[in-house]
Image: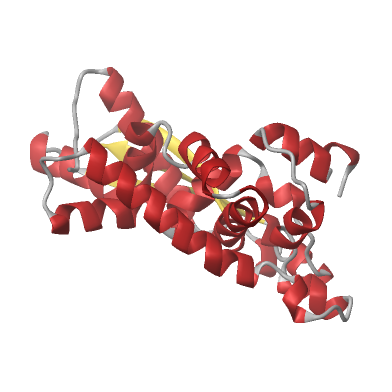
Amino acid sequence: MLEEYTLKNLEDRIGYRFQNIALLKQALTHSSFTNEQKINRAGDYERLEFLGDAVLELVSSAFLFREHPELSEGELTKMRASMVCEPSLAFCARDLELGKFMLLGKGEEATGGRERDSIISDAMEAVTGAIYLDGGMEHAKAFIDRFILSDLEDKQLFYDSKSNLQELIQGKLKKDFRYELLEESGPEHNKSFRVSVFMEDECLGEGTGRTKKAAEQQAAYKALLLLRDRGYVFKKY
């Protein structure tokens, strides 16, 4: 880790001091690192991820039950799924720059593992599990409330940005839209894509990502924010 990405600095960011700092280190340790270093597999984040997933499901379920008394069981389930899915947790992890604190094997590091949704979303759940083990449900809930259940309107817009944009432009505005690939760079194992989204001839937003799909999602999110500023309202639930 670089000096600014130490465990102490991460504690400062999340606002929680571990009694057992080894739990936080484990939550940030990918199996590629333990395999390379020939460390017992129990030293990676997978068991903590399992626990954190259960804690997150309970806290998010209670939150939605409380906040949305008008929604049915099916609607609550759908909403929870969008909030705790891989892309949404990765979005939250990037707010914390969680990937930069992680211990990865050289191969995973070289192929962009610090930015991969599947890895940083798992780490987000593992950190949740580590806080729960170290400080109990109260502290785990505080972490979830602050970093996962905050700013839900913008996060929900991001989670389903591509489908939301399509429904808004084609369904409500009755206009055509398209994505255009502007740039593709980097080696085959670590590519970067830059994409723009157009409503007819107007560029509404640009996005970058490790895949075209991720770049399109970011471009769609920026387009939705722009259209929202113009007074268009889109509510999925």
Locate residue 164 relative to residue 60 in the image: left or right: left
Q: How far across and how far down the image is residue 96, in percent?
A: 63, 39
Residue 82 x %, y %: 33, 53
Please name whichever residue, 208 or 179, is drawn nearer the observer in this view of the structure: 208
Asked if 179 appears above or below 9 in the picture, the reply is below
**Colouring scheme applied when the structure was drawn:** secondary structure
Residue found at x 54% / y 69%: 50
Residue in the image at 16% along x and 53% along y: 75
The residue nearer to you, when weighing 214 against 115, is: 115
Say whether residue 10 is left or right of residue 73: right
Provide residue 111's location: percent of width, then percent of height: 71, 66
Find the residue positioned furthest to the top. Answer: 230
Left or right: 82 in relation to 122 = left
Residue 169, relative to residue 190: is it above or below?
above
Q: Is residue 52 visible?
A: yes
* Quadrant of the rendering where the C terminus is positioned: top left
Which one is in front, 224 or 16? 16
**Residue lying at 57% horizontally and 52% vertically, measured from the top left:** 128
Name which quarter of the figure residue 105 lies in: bottom right
Q: Quadrant of residue 3?
A: top right
- Where does residue 231 sit, x and y in percent of width and height? 21, 18
- The image shows residue 63, relative to residue 73, as above or below, that is above
Count numbered badges in the picture.
0
- Confirm whether residue 165 shows in the render: no
Residue 226 as seen in the image, left or right of residue 107: left
Q: Which of these two is toward me, 196 or 97?
A: 97
Q: Residue at coordinates 78% horizontally, 53% vertically from top-left?
A: 20
